[in-house]
Amino acid sequence: MAAHLPRWSFDLDQARARVGCCHYADHKITLSRHLVVHLSAAEVDQALLHEIAHALAGHRAGHGPQWRRAAARLGYTGRRTVAVPAARLQARWLARCPHGHEYRRHRRPSTVAYCRPCSQRGEWFALEWTDQG
């Protein structure tokens, strides 16, 4: 990281829903301490390259052409996100519909949510969230 961003720092954060983050104002890149333990060394490297590309491309670049060029120069393979199934299992809030479809969230949803597979069949079940602590 220092070779590409000499004035930037690195830290671990408490995120549970994303692997990495580029903090432009603080000139800092963070990775989730909860999720990186579920990743291989190569996946952690890719997450870092993803965030370094954000820093090099700038805040307004998003995942557009400028970011893609920066990512390619760094050797990023192209996946924007890393699937971490264990992260969902650690989620604090749980809801199940009467047909057994399960949903987990890290934060309690503030709006009414319905079971998607059931609603596609015309059955509307409002999900009730329970705290799994």
Image (tube, rainbow, N blue to C red):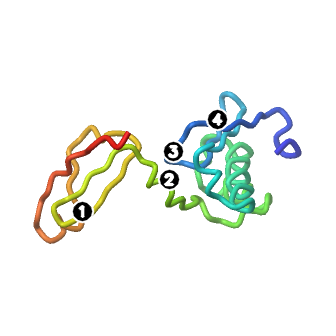
Earlier-in-chain disc, 2 versus 4: 4
Earlier-in-chain disc, 4 versus 3: 3
Q: Give me the residue at 63% from left, 43% from top.
A: 33
Q: Mark 2, mark 4: which one is toward the viewer? A: 2
Viewer-side residue, 54 vs 100:
100
Check whether the beta carbons of the residues at disc 2 and disc 3 lie within 8 A of each other: yes
Check whether the beta carbons of the residues at disc 1 and disc 2 lie within 8 A of each other: no
Percent across and percent down for residue 114 are 20, 55
Percent across and percent down for residue 29 are 69, 39
> What amino acid is at disc 1?
Arg
> What amino acid is at disc 3?
Arg
Q: Give me the residue at 60% from left, 42% from top.
A: 60
Of helix, strand and loop, which one carries label 1?
helix
Earlier-in-chain disc, 3 versus 1: 3
How busy is the neighbourhood of tag 3: few (under 14 within 10 Å), some, or many (20 plus)? some
Viewed as shown, does residue 63 lie left or right of 3? Answer: left
Q: Give me the residue at 59% from left, 54% from top.
A: 63
Q: Mark 3, mark 1: which one is toward the viewer? A: 3
Earlier-in-chain disc, 4 versus 1: 4
Of helix, strand and loop, which one carries label 4?
strand
Q: Mark 1, mark 2: which one is toward the viewer? A: 2
Image quarter of residue 11: top right
Q: Give me the residue at 20% from left, 45% from top.
A: 112
Circle 2 residue: 87
Circle 1 residue: 116
Return the mark for residue 130.
Answer: none
Return the mark for residue 23.
Answer: 4
Viewer-side residue, 52 vs 41:
41
